[in-house]
Amino acid sequence: MKPAPFDYLRPQTRDEALTLKAEHGDDAMFLAGGQSLVPAMNFRMAQPTVLIDIGALDDQATITIDPASGALHLGSRVRHRQLEFDPQIAATAPLLAEAAPLVAHAQIRNRGTLCGNLAHADPASEFPAVMLALDATFWVASTAGKRELAAKDFFLGIYTTALEETEMLVEVVLPASPPRSGYAFVEMARRPGDYAQMGVAVCMALHETGTIESARIVLCSAGDTPMNAHNAASALIGEVPDQPVFEAAAALVDQDIAPLGSVHASAEFQRHLAQVLTRRALSIAGARATGERRQAA
Ligand SMILES: Cc1cc2nc3c(=O)[nH]c(=O)nc-3n(C[C@H](O)[C@H](O)[C@H](O)COP(=O)(O)OP(=O)(O)OC[C@H]3O[C@@H](n4cnc5c(N)ncnc54)[C@H](O)[C@@H]3O)c2cc1C
């Protein structure tokens, strides 16, 4: 199929893009990488009358590290491919770098943007889960100004976010990792490049004594938003990072998810995957955190 007719606008600055969005409201949609929007338009699932192409906003394609806080700042046009290969991402947000090659295929990663992916809010997507695991902050802007949102408050449901009609997601900020921290992203997909049947993002940090001081476990394809496994993560706090502890925590993940099932994976199978993958992710993250602690000692 072909898309319904639309007007195509290509602003050169962010202010210009926001003014156009304020003017056209819900009739207009931002076009970033087009990897989700264009197929949706071709299927007539999305029928914007105006497309605002944000591909020319060069000031939005930046990756910077705040020298004072160590936080990583990602502009709205940062592409999946940069997340996969940029050395600054590998050094400061290795969880994001680990998840990036699991998203779609190389051709799609060349075009797709992190902010487009997050604004699309597919609960099967890897990046929203990674954002919650990394405790990201999102900056959104309109002609009325800017506001910040915690990643955990951004995703409201399937393809639904806290973005208002006239707002653009303009920046993602990831705090620096605490010392002695480990991370892992693992998933099960039918074929490379497919959306995951289940995926798990884990971050943990150790106390200097070696026990687990903080942990976040977030799953994709596990409900209608990225699912934060609070119960499982809480069970880790104060414990020594070893296999029995990880197994006990992984058994609790079932309480925190509500997988929807599909023709390829029943909800029951997804629940099984969630436990197995959480155990694996915790083992990897625990080993990385322990290795970092040894190196620091
Ligand atoms: C075959 C295929 C396989 C895929 N597999 C995966 C996968 O395994 N995992 C995965 O996570 N994704 C997958 N994707 C989706 C891919 O990651 C998309 O690139 C991503 O979802 C959208 O990013 P985009 O930049 O292309 O956004 P677009 O398609 O341009 O836009 C998506 C939506 O976000 C809005 N938008 C874009 N930018 C902004 C912004 N800055 N502020 C506000 N709204 C904005 C648009 O208006 C639109 O509603 C796949 C896509 C395809 C086609």
Image (cartoon, rainbow, N blue to C red):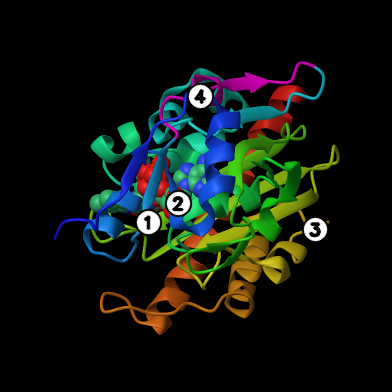
In the rendered image, which quarter is residue 269 located in? bottom left
Going from the N terminus, do you reach mark 4 or mark 2 first?
2
Closer to viewer: mark 2 or mark 3: 2
Q: Indicate the quadrant containing the N terminus: top left, top right, bottom left or bottom right.
A: bottom left
Find residue 99 and report its horizontal and vertical position in percent. 45, 43
Circle 4 SS class: loop
Q: Which residue is the site of mark 3?
A: 237
Q: Which residue is mark 4?
A: 61
What's the amino acid at mark 1? Pro
Residue 181 placement: quadrant: top right
The reply to whether residue 193 is in sight is: no
Mark 2 sits on what residue?
28
- Compared with residue 56, is residue 231 higher up or lower down, i.e. above or below? below
Residue 64 or residue 262, whichever sits in front: 64
Give how far across and how far down residue 121 sits, in percent. Answer: 50, 58
Disc 1, disc 4: CB below 8 Å?
A: no
How far is the residue under mark 4 from the one under mark 2?
A: 22 Å
Residue at 70% across, 59% down:
153
Instruction: Give coordinates of residue 52: x percent, y percent.
Output: 42, 40
Residue 89 appears in view: yes
Which element is circle 1 on?
loop
